[in-house]
Image (cartoon, rainbow, N blue to C red):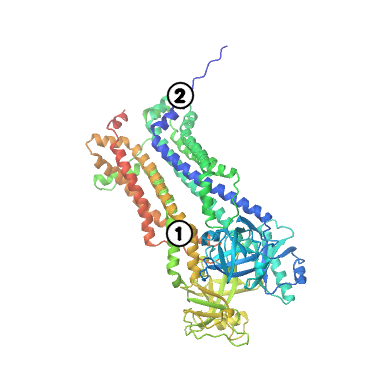
């Protein structure tokens, strides 16, 4: 028997025809998806390539498992005992000096540079460009700092009065992020540098040598939890052995808490997660746009669908047909987007990361996860959303499709409207009839608003802190002394009339895998700087507003703090909150401080002052805390993210235009029959536009207003959660001008779309209404 050729499914021919008939809409969706997928793919590729390079450098460049610093250099006997404790480790010297850096040779300090001698066994540097120093007057500096400071290879810089020639740029494995102190709120590549000199070059520098020792565990811990247990155990061993030898531990930092090591990879991981979530939310919005479009098409083609069903086409075949367009568009967008991700967007994201962090030389790796996350998952989202909506739309008999009776219920009663004017009732009816479309429109506006608020709020927050840094400090200067007495045993004093003694002790707040540093102050009675009651009893304290806001503490709560290197805990009762107190701080009267921490009467840590103290020798001063720390933090973030945030604002506006265009297009297309009928009745285009566009405008303005305020609250809550992983605190600030700016940007986007919508309404022919008549 001769085999007959099967007739080709006619539905296949309709797919390219649908693309041609509505090519503008599909082109907009396609370009939007390509750009979004390309950007997130580029983020994933650059992100994972950097992460893999950082992970390889852990072994290649011998990254420490932690380090500690001693007051004096350890002898061989102490080092031997420290390596044979209950926690088995291998210890190597990792000494450094902090020197003043003058990049432009103008005689002024531009920042601080931390110098290591070439040849250290642990914490090695990756040569980024040039060559390593070979002579005593040569130096290699961090490549990120060099870019920020404008230093080139071959330039000469001055370090504490000594000239050095820059021979290369490096990236230290333990300084992927430029934190001078682990307690700093944010890194500072503008004013902090890390460099390498020869052993001779190290010895010729006048700075004090920090006797820093890095260790590696003999047996690697299985996970972070085991590493934490080993670390807590080892700090006790170090404290015991150093005390027994007459030495003292002045610093201790395990690797898992070292922000200079982990901030960059943690931030990149967060960026990747946020980027993926943003992509999936926007793909879901586009999926609903597709679904609404297809539902509208099914209503228009109900008679055709009924005929096809009567001819023997199954429901599954029709569902697959209507699913094909969104899946094909998403698939092609994903493939082209990934191609752009590995080329243009990868370079863009790499540049953004190198603008913030001191990362190793780039090595690009093929990333299967990027393909899955930016192509397969968007296809799945698009498929599932459209399958659900289309399947619901196809739940009718062939006869119902032929008659155009696609109502869910046999008898649908119109919602009774208030006794308003005709035009107001007409507009309300339009909103009710297109309720689902407007809900998706509001969700789209909210999604864009959140991103736009981030783009506007971040620069606004940084500007706010830069402008108000002085008002956030309870004293313009805090002088922390090395000792309250000089070498003769005489108390160190000052002639500054506004100087006031204070006590200070650094404790820790234990938070699972994070330890927060807390400054505990002893305040002079009737202090001019910190206003707290003098009659506070033993365990009663006041806390800073930053402390209260970050950890949700209130009056009456009990807080527990512990010594950094001992397992000694202190409990305090919160009796009040000090405003205008930047930092995570606790305050009590000095007499209570002395009793609580066992100090001798009259002993103090330093001076508060609103004017600079000039009559205390620099050799007696351990550190000076000023508002410069806040402005430097804001300046660093602005330098790293300012240009990105401005570009992000432009992207959000384009995104708003695209979403509003697609969603309003669906609403107008769904009402083409009604628009055509109003034209037949004699209404002019301007009058018709006032009916339909005004309805959409009302929804857009309401959604814009709601999204601005709810989006700000959402971002503030997310910001507070994010700050829990970092030392210190600064709140997300969105001023009135920022709220207005966010609202206006969405409104401008809609005005652009409104002009397009008016043109679209004017093109609806009168004959459209006649097509719908039976």
Residue 128's spot in the image, x, y percent? 60, 55
Instruction: Quickly name the residue at label 1.
Output: 458
Q: Residue at x 38, y 58 (%)?
A: 739
Please, what secondary structure does the residue beneath circle 2 have?
helix
Position of residue 364 relative to residue 572, above or below, is: above
Position of residue 431 relative to residue 553, above or below, is: above
Q: How many dots with numbers?
A: 2
Mark toward the start of the polypeptide (1 vs 2): 2
Please, what secondary structure does the residue beneath circle 1 have?
helix
- The C terminus appears in which quarter of the rendering? top left
Camera-side residue of 285 and 743: 743
Q: Residues within 10 Å of mark 2 (few under 14, many from 20)?
A: few
Question: Residue 494, which numbered label?
Answer: none
Q: Residue at x 49, y 35 (%)?
A: 328
Instruction: Quickly name the residue at label 2.
Output: 10
Position of residue 458 relative to residue 674, above or below, is: below
Residue 547's spot in the image, x, y percent? 52, 69
Is label 1 or label 2 in front?
A: 1
Camera-side residue of 29 and 675: 29
Can you tell which quarter of the image residue 688 is in?
top left
Mark 1 and mark 2 in contact? Answer it, CB < 8 Å: no
Q: Can residue 48 be seen at all in this image of the molecule?
A: yes
- The N terminus appears in which quarter of the rendering? top right
Residue 760's spot in the image, x, y percent? 31, 38
């Amino acid at each position: 028997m001769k085999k007959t050729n099967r007739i080709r499914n006619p539905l296949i021919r309709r797919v390219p025809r649908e693309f041609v008939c509505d090519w503008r809409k599909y082109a907009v969706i396609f370009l939007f998806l390509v750009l979004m997928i390309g950007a997130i793919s580029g983020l994933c590729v650059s992100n994972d390539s950097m992460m893999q390079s950082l992970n390889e450098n852990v072994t290649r460049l011998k990254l420490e498992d932690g380090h500690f610093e001693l007051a004096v250099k350890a002898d061989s006997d102490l080092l031997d005992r420290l390596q044979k404790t209950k926690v088995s480790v291998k210890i190597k010297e990792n000494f450094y000096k902090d020197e003043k850096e003058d990049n432009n040779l103008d005689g002024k300090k531009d920042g601080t540079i931390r110098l290591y001698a070439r040849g250290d066994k642990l914490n090695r540097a990756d040569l980024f460009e040039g060559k390593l120093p070979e002579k005593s007057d040569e130096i290699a500096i961090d490549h990120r700092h060099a870019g920020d400071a404008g230093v080139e290879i071959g330039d000469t810089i001055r370090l504490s009065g000594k000239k050095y020639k820059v021979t290369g740029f490096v990236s230290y494995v333990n300084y992927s992020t430029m934190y001078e102190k682990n307690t700093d709120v944010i890194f500072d590549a503008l004013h902090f540098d890390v460099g390498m000199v020869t052993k001779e070059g190290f010895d010729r520098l006048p700075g004090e040598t920090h006797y820093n020792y890095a260790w590696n565990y003999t047996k690697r811990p299985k996970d972070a939890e085991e590493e934490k247990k080993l670390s807590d155990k080892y700090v006790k061993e170090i404290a015991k052995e150093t005390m027994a030898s007459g030495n003292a531990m002045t610093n201790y930092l395990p690797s898992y808490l070292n922000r200079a090591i982990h901030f960059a990879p943690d931030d990149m991981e967060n960026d990747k997660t946020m980027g993926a979530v943003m992509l999936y939310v926007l793909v879901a919005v586009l999926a609903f746009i597709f679904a609404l479009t297809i539902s509208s098409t099914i209503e228009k083609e109900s008679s055709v669908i009924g005929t096809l069903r009567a001819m023997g086409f199954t429901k599954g075949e029709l569902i697959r047909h209507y699913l094909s367009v969104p899946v094909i568009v998403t698939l092609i967008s994903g493939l082209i987007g990934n191609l752009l991700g590995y080329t243009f967007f990868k370079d863009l994201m790499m540049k953004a990361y190198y603008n913030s962090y001191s990362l190793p030389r780039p090595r690009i790796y093929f990333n299967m996860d990027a393909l899955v996350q930016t192509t397969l998952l968007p296809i799945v989202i698009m498929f599932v959303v459209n399958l659900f909506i289309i399947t619901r739309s196809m739940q009718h008999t062939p006869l119902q499709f032929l008659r155009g009776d696609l109502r869910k219920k046999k008898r649908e009663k119109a919602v009774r409207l208030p006794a308003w004017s005709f035009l107001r009732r007409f507009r309300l009816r339009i909103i009710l009839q297109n309720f689902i479309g407007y809900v998706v429109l509001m969700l789209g506006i909210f999604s864009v608003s959140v991103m736009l608020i981030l783009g506007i709020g971040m620069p606004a927050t940084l500007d706010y802190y830069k402008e108000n840094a002085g008002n956030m400090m309870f004293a313009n200067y805090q002088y922390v002394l090395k000792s309250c007495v000089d070498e003769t045993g005489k108390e160190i004093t000052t002639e500054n009339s506004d100087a006031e003694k204070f006590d200070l002790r650094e404790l820790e707040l234990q938070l699972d895998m994070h330890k927060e540093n807390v400054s505990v102050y002893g305040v002079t009675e009737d202090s001019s700087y910190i206003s707290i009651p003098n009659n506070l009893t033993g365990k009663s304290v006041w806390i800073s507003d930053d402390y209260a806001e970050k950890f949700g503490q209130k009056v009456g709560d009990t807080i527990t703090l512990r010594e950094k290197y001992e397992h000694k805990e202190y409990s305090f009762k919160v009796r009040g909150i000090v405003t205008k107190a930047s930092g995570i701080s606790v305050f009590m009267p000095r007499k209570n401080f002395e009793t609580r921490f066992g100090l001798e009467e009259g002993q103090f840590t330093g001076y508060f002052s609103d004017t600079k103290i000039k009559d205390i020798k620099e050799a007696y001063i351990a550190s000076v805390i000023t508002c410069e720390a806040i402005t430097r933090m804001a300046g660093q973030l602005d330098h790293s993210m300012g240009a990105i945030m401005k570009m992000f604002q432009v992207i959000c506006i384009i995104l708003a235009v695209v979403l509003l265009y697609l969603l309003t297009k669906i609403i107008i297309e769904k009402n083409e029959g009604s628009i055509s009928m109003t034209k037949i009745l004699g209404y002019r285009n301007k009058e018709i536009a006032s009916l339909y566009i005004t309805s959409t405008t009302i929804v857009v303005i309401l959604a814009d207003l709601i999204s601005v305020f709810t989006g700000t609250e959402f971002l503030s809550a997310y910001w507070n959660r994010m700050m829990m992983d970092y030392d210190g605190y600064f709140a997300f600030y969105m001023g009135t001008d920022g709220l207005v700016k966010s609202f206006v940007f969405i409104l401008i986007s809609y005005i652009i779309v409104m002009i397009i919508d008016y043109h679209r309404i004017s093109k609806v022919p009168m004959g459209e209404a006649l097509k719908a008549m039976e």
